[in-house]
Image: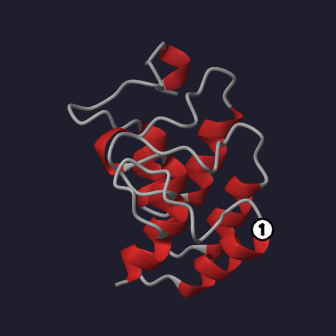
């Protein structure tokens, strides 16, 4: 109803987080699915807390991660600012199921040090 009345679905808070970023961080899979179905959603913006995908990786929700991995709007490797990548987010939060899923996906290299922090996932785990 709110979206039908012209609310900006990509509105950002003072740290740059969007409704999609909040929904992903709070394990709100039905809200994430709904927002991603909207044609104008900015699917890879999340502000200081990281992308929606990275935030979801930190929750450990396998169903949410699976849905996002299979969504063409999601750039699973995007890193915002000085944040971690999704593999590092899962590692930092000790979400083993998500870690295994991301490693099995093949798009993530645990030795990748291309984030601004110049840390590989192993560094994050230490």
Q: Position of residue 42 (x, y in %)?
A: 55, 28
Please name the residue shown 56% across and 61% down the image. Answer: 112
Look at 67% across and 82% down and name the residue there. Answer: 100
**Percent x, y of residue 91:** 46, 77
Give the residue at the far left of this rendering.
Answer: 14
Residue at position x 78%, y 66% in the image: 106
The residue labelled by disc 1 is 105
Residue 58 in view in this figure: no
Which element is circle 1 on? Answer: helix
Judged left or right of residue 28, residue 16 is left
Foreground residue among 94 and 123:
123
Image quadrant assignment for residue 67: bottom right
Q: Say above or below: 33 vs 40.
A: below
What colouring style does the render use?
secondary structure
In the rendered image, which quarter is residue 11 located in? top left
Q: Position of residue 68 (x, y in %)?
A: 68, 54
Name the one closer to the observer, 24 or 77. Answer: 77
């Amino acid at each position: 109803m709110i979206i039908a009345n012209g609310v900006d679905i990509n509105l950002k808070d003072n740290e740059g987080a969007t409704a999609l970023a909040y929904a992903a961080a709070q394990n709100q899979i039905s809200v994430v699915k709904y927002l991603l179905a909207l044609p104008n959603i900015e699917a890879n913006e999340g502000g200081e807390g990281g992308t929606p995908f990275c935030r979801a990786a930190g929750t450990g929700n396998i169903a949410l991660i699976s849905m996002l991995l299979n969504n063409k709007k999601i750039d699973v490797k995007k890193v915002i600012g000085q944040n971690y990548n999704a593999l590092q987010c899962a590692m930092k939060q000790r979400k083993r199921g998500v870690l295994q899923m991301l490693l099995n996906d093949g798009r993530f290299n645990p030795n990748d040090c291309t984030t601004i922090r110049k840390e590989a996932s192993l560094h994050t785990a230490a």
